[in-house]
Amino acid sequence: MANEPHDLMSREIEEELRRERFLRLWNTYGIYVVAAAVLLVAGVGGWKLYEHRQAQANAAASTKYIIALTDFAGKRTYEALKSLEELVAQAPAGYATLAKLRLAAYDGAEGNAAEALATYDRIAKDASVDPLLADYARLQSAMLKFDGADFTELKNQLRPLAIDRSPWRYSARELLGLGAAKSGRPAEAKNYFQRLLADRGTPPGISERARVMMAALTEAERAKPPPDAAEKSETPGKVEPSQEDKGEDKAAAGGKKTE
């Protein structure tokens, strides 16, 4: 009990000292604390505003892109092309790329293969484009080049898209199988088609075409003569002389004896 006044006084002195130290720190660094707090609030608010505006821009671009596709379906080509060109110029990056891809598809369908290829190649080489869309551009480029491309070139372009983790692997493997068959490599072609048939995730359309190609390749192999039969047909055998030839030989021999 005797120490209570002393303890109370000690606590008050300690509180006063802490208060004085806090005031000195605040007078020295308080402005920085306030500035940091203001910046934090402003930063969070700015980021939220940016996210809100981005969401609005994406929503508007999405609506405009769907309208453009609807216009294409309704044969309103002029309106569709105009909307896509506006998206290329004004939309966020993702929708701008989608619009470029759709414009390239239109060029390809209209016979402007060179323009379509140029667009696909630019998208494929743009490091800022989403890898999923860049790979899609590579796939479309390979489809356009298919008829005139060398199989090695086709294979180099499509091999990265044919791996198991690629979302475009089914289309890439089908193109590789068709390319191998076209270039006279039936065994390699069958390997690609067998992989498609063995994969349960293969889309039905691609699976059906792979089945047709496997049947065609197998039938072509059966129609070929065996290698030993081909060699026999090419190697001339011993020809027996005919009866007429034998008669002529005897006559010639008799004539020589008479002489």
Image (tube, grey):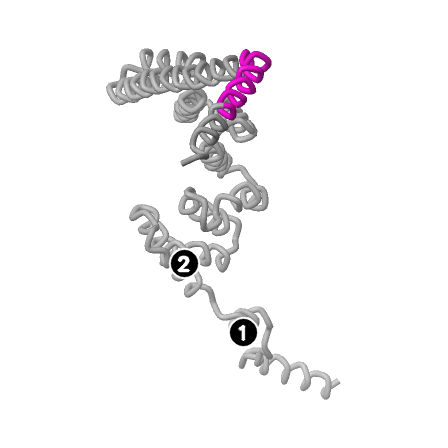
Question: Residue furthest toward the right?
Answer: 259
At horizontal 47% and vertical 67% (from top left) the residue drawn is 225
Magenta stretch secondary structure, dominant: helix
Name the secondary structure under disc 1.
Answer: helix
Name the secondary structure under disc 2.
Answer: helix
Query: Residue 28, how many percent across, how many down?
Result: 59, 13
Q: Residues within 10 Å of mark 2 (few under 14, many from 20)?
A: some
Tell me, for residue 194, which label it has, or none: 2
Q: Amino acid at mark 2?
A: Gln
Q: For residue 255: magenta?
A: no
At horizontal 49% and vertical 38% (from top left) the residue drawn is 147
At horizontal 45% and vertical 32% (from top left) the residue drawn is 133
Q: Is residue 194 left or right of residue 245?
A: left
Q: Amino acid at mark 1?
A: Asp
The C terminus appears in which quarter of the rendering?
bottom right
Residue behind mark 1: 228
**Is 4 above or below relative to 112?**
below
Q: Which residues are magenta?
A: 13-32
